[in-house]
Amino acid sequence: RYVIAVSAFSLFQGFLAGTQVVQGVYRVHGSFAHSNPLGITMVTLGPLLLVSTVQETQRRALFALAYLAAALGIVYTRSRASLALLGLGTGAVLGFMFLRGLVLGRIQVVRRVAILVVCGGLAVTPLAIKIADGVIKRFKEAPASSKESRDRANEAAKQMLRDAPLTGKGLNHYVHYLDYGYGLDIEEGDRTIVHHVYWLTGAELGWPGLLLLVAIVLTWLLVGVQALLTAQDDWVAHVALGLTVGYGLCHLQHLYEWAMRKPQVLFQLTTMA
């Protein structure tokens, strides 16, 4: 039921994203206020939809369509991090399922993965050719000043952590302390937040808050890995694979983002955990 609910959500976001593409929106955002949370959400849910497409037989069409909606949503957010993690997540899921199938003699799973790779590759090639120029342009034309400004914001957060290692500056107080000698060289458009959820957490909650966040993340990753490696049932193992990869990719992307602090993304991560 959870995977069905995730599929419905993905299809809904895909529909909104498609509507925005038709309307000429350059970076679609679905029902979110910005494109980055949409990309992060789809990156997180995509692996679960992909393993369900390979494993499930009765609802395979639904899960496949939902995964396609998630992938297209990521592509049209034009988020560089989300695009890279889409490829990483897809490769990790299919590669692990293929190798697990070979080792355990699950020939049917191996066959399904091989068919999906071949058919999927042929199906997406025309679309990939069509959007390749825009994606490449997005990577090549990223202004160096944007990265430099984000680096300065990260450095301001690190300085706050150094100055208040036990307590931090207070939850949601990062932006206020920028008026008190921190990050004076940060561009105006980047003075509202740190694009690194861990340094942001450290700046506001100190080392105790930062270490607690890391402990929570690692705990659930270890739970997922344990379930993945010890499960005897293929369905349980594959669901654990999808959840663990998606959960891990989300936190990996937050080395460059802060959207985990948004209620929608945090609720999603809590539900997955």
Image (tube, helix red, strand yellow):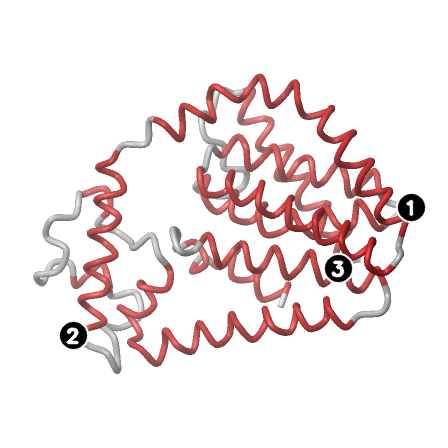
Query: 97 or 166, which lies in front?
Result: 97
The location of residue 67, given as percent across then percent down, is 70, 40
In the shown orientation, is residue 34 left or right of residue 18?
left
Quadrant into which the C terminus falls: bottom right
Q: Quadrant of the N terminus?
A: bottom right
Which is nearer the N-term, disc 2 or disc 3? 2
Say which element carries label 3: helix
Q: Which residue is mark 1?
A: 58
Q: Is residue 109 left or right of residue 238?
A: right
Q: Dot 2: what SS?
A: helix
Which percent across, then down, holds residue 235? Answer: 83, 60
Q: Residue at x 25, y 35 (%)?
A: 144
Disc tally is: 3
Label 2 Cα neighbours within 10 Å, binned few <14 / some 14-19 / many ≥20: some
**Upstream in sequence: badge 1 or badge 3:** 1
Amino acid type at circle 1 is Gln
The CA span between labels 2 and 3 is 43 Å
Task: Report, in whole angstroms, how far the alpha carbon at label 2 lies from the one at label 1.
Answer: 57 Å
At mark 1, the secondary structure is loop
Q: Which mark is residue 131?
A: none
**Residue denoted by label 3:** 239
Q: Amino acid at mark 3?
A: Val
Question: For mark 2, what is the residue?
Answer: 163
- What x and y, as percent, mark residue 239? 75, 59
